[in-house]
Image: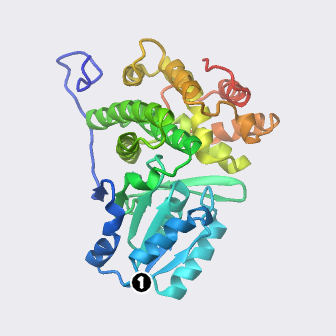
Amino acid sequence: MPPYRTVGKPGHAMKFDYETSPVRTLFGAGRLGELADEVGRLGWSRPMLLSTPQQADLLAHARNLLQAFDTASFDGVAMHTPVAVTKDALAKVAEHGTDGLVSLGGGSSVGLGKAISIRTGLPHMAIPTTYAGSEMTPILGETENGRKVTQRQPAIRPDIVLYDSELTLTLPLAMSVTSGLNAIAHAVEAIYAPDANPVTSLMAEEGVRAMASALRAIVADDQDRAAREEALYAAWLCGTCLGQVGMGLHHKLCHTLGGMFDLPHAETHSIVLPHAMAYNEGAAPQMTRIARALDAHGSAAMAMHELSLELNAPTALRELGMAESGIAAAADQAVSSPYPNPRPIERDGIADLLRRAWSGAAPGN
C-alpha cells in the first residue's frame, strides 16, 4: 500500500476533521543568527530567555545576539514543569516587564515557556535543541504534589518555532536517541488516534521513517549534519501530529510514571513505547504503517523494540531508578482516568505491560 492510501476498502467515502493553527516556523542550519531580526520583527523590547544551567553557553550566546534589547533570563527550568518553578519564573517575568518569551533547550524549557505564556498571554518563541517535538503541540503537562496533569488548548502552542540543526550537534548521543524515540511515540499514537485523519497519518508515517533513519545515522556519526537536520525535520512532523490528534495509552503511562516517580521524560517514553504498541497492536490495524516506516514486515511493536536495541536506548524502567513496588500504584493511577485508546484499558493488562517495561523484557500482549 503506498503511503498516501488511507485505511479502509477502496471506494468507501472518507469523513474526517482537520484543523490547523498558525505557527511561524523557521527551519535551517544557522537560523539562530536571525534571532534579533525576528525579535525586532515581533516588536518586542524586553524579551525573557528561558533555559537550564546546562545550557549556560547557549543562553549567553542568545543574550549576546539580543544585546540591542533589554534582555533578561531565567535558568531554573526543571523537568516535568513543576508548578513551583513556574511561579518563580512568573515573578521574574513580572519584575522585568517581559513582553516576549524565548525558550531555549528541550521539552522542559519549552514546557516552562508554555506555562508562562498561557498564564500571562505573552507571545512565545521556542528554539528546541532536542528532537522530542513538543514545541509543535498545544499540550502542557505540569507537575505538583507527585501528579502530572495535562491540558490542551490552542493558546498553549508557541507562536514561533526556530529550528537550527547546528544547535543539536552538541546534544549528547544518548539524549539524541531518547528524544528522537520520544518524538516517534507522538507519531505512533497519532496513527491510531480516534480523531486520526489522512493528513496526520501521512505526516506520522513520514515522521517515523525520517526519525529512525536519522537516529541510525547519528549513532554511526554524531557529527553528521545532514542526519541532525533530518532528525529536526522528523521532530517537527511528529510534534505536529501530536498537536492535531488526541493522546492514548502510551502518553497516559508516561505522564503517570513521570509524575509519580520523577523519571526522566525522554527515557521513559523510549522504554514504554514498544510495550504500549504491543498492548494495542491487535486492536489497531493502522499500525502496519508504522511497521512499514520502520522497514519491518511483522510486528510494529517488535520492530520498535529492535530499533531501541540497535540504538542502545534504555529498555528497563528499573534502570531509571523506579522501584518494582511502584508498578501496582502506577497501574492503578493509569486506569483511573484513561485516555481514549484502541484496546480497552484493563488493569491486569496494564500491570503486565508495566512489569515488562520495568524489567526490560521484550514487548508482549
User: Would residue 253 appear left or right of 63 to someone viewing this image?
Assistant: right
Asked if residue 160 can be seen in this view, the reply is no
Amino acid, disc 1: Arg
Which of 268/120 is in front?
268
Q: Which image quadrant: the N terminus?
A: top left
Badge 1 crowding class, 10 Å Cα cut-off, few under 14, some 14 to 19, many 20 or more, is: some
Q: Locate residue 318, reporting x and y percent.
A: 75, 35
Q: Quadrant of residue 330?
A: top right
Query: Residue 213 sits in which quadrant?
Result: top left
Q: Is residue 231 above or below residue 45?
A: above
Residue that appears at 48% across and 32% down: 220
Foreground of the two, 146 or 44? 44
Residue 46 in the image, given as x and y percentages of width and height:
41, 84
Answer above or below: position of 260 versus 103. Answer: above
Q: Is residue 329 left or right of residue 60?
A: right
Q: Secondary structure at mark 1?
A: loop
Q: How is the image coloured?
A: rainbow
Of the 4 image quadrants, the one containing the C terminus is: top right
Q: Looking at the image, is 348 positioned above or below residue 168?
A: above
x 54%, y 18%: residue? 302
Q: Which residue appears farthest toward the right when viewing the image?
A: 325
Label tally = 1
Residue shown at 36%/59% (left/top)?
161
Could you tell me residue 94's position as x and y percent? 52, 84
Residue to which mark 1 is pinned: 46
241 vs 357, left or right, is: left
Residue at left 30%, top 68%? 34
Res. 98 in view = yes
Instruction: Report x, y in % for residue 21.
Output: 29, 56
